[in-house]
Image: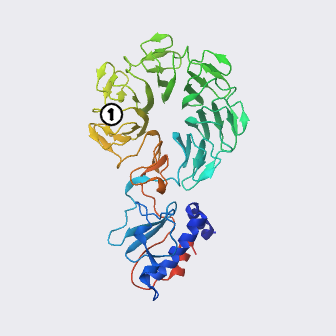
Amino acid sequence: MKSKKNWHIVRPWMTRGARILILGVLVALTMASHPPPTHAGELLAADTLLNADGTLNLRAGASGAIDLRGWNVTLDSTRGPVFEPSDRAPNAPSAVDWNPLGTGMNGTVYALAVIGTDLYVGGWFTTCGGTSGCNFVAKWNGSSWSTLGTGVNSAVNALAVSGTDLYVGGYFTTCGGTSGCNYVAKWNGSVWSTLGSGVDSSVSALAVSGTDLYVGGYFTTCGGTSGCNYVAKWNGSSWSTLGSGVVSSVSALAVSGTNLYAGGEFITCGGTDGCNFVAKWNGSVWSTLGSGVDGAVSALAVSGTNLYAGGEFTTCGGTNGCNYVAEWNGSSWSTLGSGVSNTVRALGVSGTDLYVGGYFTTCGGTGGCNYVAKWNGSSWSTLGTGMDYWVLAFAINGAGMYTGGNFTSAGACHSAAGCNHIARYGTTPTAVTLSSFRANPQPFDLVAWFRQILGH
């Protein structure tokens, strides 16, 4: 049983072409350490077949045996063989870096959520990990991708978790092949279900408080009832309004205790002016957060009793310098240093650290914060070399920080390595194969090593 389990873990990266190439690599192990009397040119130079991160470039089209003299090779569970020159120590397993999730997605990721060790992903994609049928929503279990039934029929903008249930919001009207899932639906781990008759236009934000689901977006009707102006509540069986709602779209929601915070494009909430792009609902009435901000809010996150807001604004509470991100402590607004250089689209909290994603390339006045950065409460820092394009979503658990967006490179993890629209920032995973070797001029027992890989 053990050997079958380990082989299953290794298989996600072993396409038919990969298996053929890996066989060539395994054969080459013996040839490289004790080469037969053939012409040197018959062995392929390893460095001509590698991606920048040391993984094999399976698109190179080469065939034959690889000369591994001078190389250390570790077989990684998702990336396959990873090559490093033997004069350099292998990367420490604890090194923090960007890591792929299989081969990622074929389109933009807008939303992320975690249930236990599973990561749920929503966006504008139909393929995950090279598998079709991942229609706009999918699950990553730590080693492989899977579909959620037949998914939904259009883009997913928002995800939220309540126990083992996943709530999904977006542009869709069909879920699991069933119509009537109007812009919002529930996945219970095996089947899709509607939330009454849903809402009448797209959903941009979701947040859970106890057994209640709060929904924000572009709608004005919920469950067939008018007056659900851009924000509403689903209690598990019926829809209700939040007072008279707000006067324009809601793009972000966050819960702190019994309070719901909403951000978006509105300036009026509950019939009151001055709710400039961000407001609070305490369960019965709406209230302003000081004088708010001067531009649309697209992301909210709670840390203790503090609220972080990100968006298109540069002024908060009437103060300049709140460049696209700011903090509300319950009574006043404050800047985060000098902020960032362009719109913020995603916020994530881990302990005392705030992760920020969006369209910016500078944070705290320093370049190199390419679309993602960290604020530790007093200063900004980069996350490696960041991404090559927009960051739109975060989800954090014990495995690290999952990041989604419109990028195809994260740090040194490029598209060919699998960081397509999604990546994980955290410790580099330990090879699951239980075996690595150091190339040397001594004879090498290929059969014994291969048995180690399979767990025999």
Q: Quadrant of residue 214?
A: top right
Residue 258 shows up from this direction? no
Mark 1 element type: loop
Residue 117 shows up from this direction? yes
Residue under the point 65% across and 47% down: 133
Q: Is residue 281 above or below residue 169?
A: above
Q: Residue 257: image x %, image y %? A: 48, 28
Q: Is residue 282 above or below residue 377?
A: above
Q: Residue 447: image x %, image y %? A: 54, 81
Quarter of the picture containing the N terminus is bottom right
Q: Quadrant of residue 176?
A: top right
Residue under the point 59% across and 53% down: 130
Asked which colour scheme the image uses, the reply is rainbow
> Quick one: 99 or 397, which is closer to the camera?
99
The amino acid type found where label 1 is placed reads Ser
In the displayed orientation, state which residue is furthest to the right. 178
Taking 182 as reference, is 70 left or right? left
Q: Is residue 144 above or below residue 284?
A: below
Q: Residue 358: image x %, image y %? A: 41, 36
Is the residue marked by circle 1 packed among few (<14), some (14-19), or many (20+) residues within 10 Å?
many
**Residue that mark 1 sits on:** 341
